[in-house]
Image (cartoon, rainbow, N blue to C red):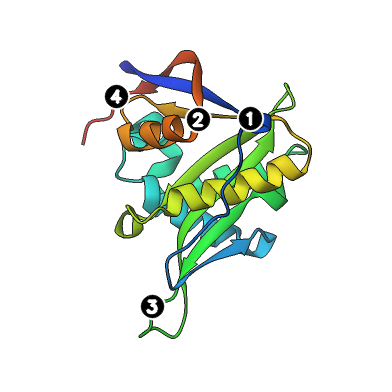
Amino acid sequence: MSLTYFKRYQMELDLQQFDIPTPELPTGYRFVAWTDSDLDKHASIKHESFCNEIDANVFSCFREFEGCQLLLREITSRSNFLPDATWMLEYKSPDSEYPVSVGTIQALVDVQQRGAIQNIGIHPQHRDKGLGSSLLFKCLTFIKARGIQRVMLEVTSQNVGALRLYERLGFRIIKTVYKPAPITTY
């Protein structure tokens, strides 16, 4: 099996130096707090957010709903899972009866007692509306409320949009890592 390597940045934000803006959502969107019964909704939106993105090559679990479901079960069953910092975004259009899930974020506490953002996923049809920032602000608010002073995340260097967002918010690169992944051919 042939491997390729993806450059990823570990980034960190000092929450003591960061005034978290109040998250604002466009009309029709709302935050939904984590509940175990919503795991499949989180898995579905995670899959839809990442299945055609570069990170699906880095993390093969993003390619299939079942992989995202398994990943979320793993994240949420950990003793360091932060359910109060884990959120979903829903959107209800004026002409629909029911809302649809369009965004997700999960968080843990790492061994250094930092908040650890796992994934921020926004459905492709709902991007460029500030939803990623709002979802991140919501998560950071609850991490900071726990007295956690620093938060970290990882981003693939080729994910320029996410990288720019994190840098704009004050995250700084603290380490570069290379993630091996099998070369897939279709």
Mark 1 is on which residue type? Answer: Gln
Name the residue carrying label 4.
183
- What crowding class fits label 3: few (fewer than 14 Cα within 10 Å), some (14-19), or many (20 or more)? few
Q: Residue at x 69, y 42 (%)?
A: 143
Q: CA distance from mark 3 to mark 1?
A: 37 Å
Q: Considering only order in the chain, which callout, 1 or 3, is on the residue closer to the N terminus?
A: 1
The answer to whether marks 2 and 1 mark residues whose Cβ atoms lie closer than 8 Å is yes
The residue closer to the viewer here, 21 or 107, is 21
Among numbered discs 2 and 3, the one appearing first in the sequence: 3
Kindly identify the amino acid type of the residue bearing the numbered disc 4.
Ile
Disc 1 designates what residue?
17
Residue 65 in view (yes/no): no
Q: Which marked residue is nearer to the observer: mark 2 or mark 4?
A: 2
Instruction: Find the distance from the CA under tag 2 to the CA under tag 3.
Output: 33 Å
Earlier residue among tags 3 and 4: 3
Secondary structure found at label 3: loop
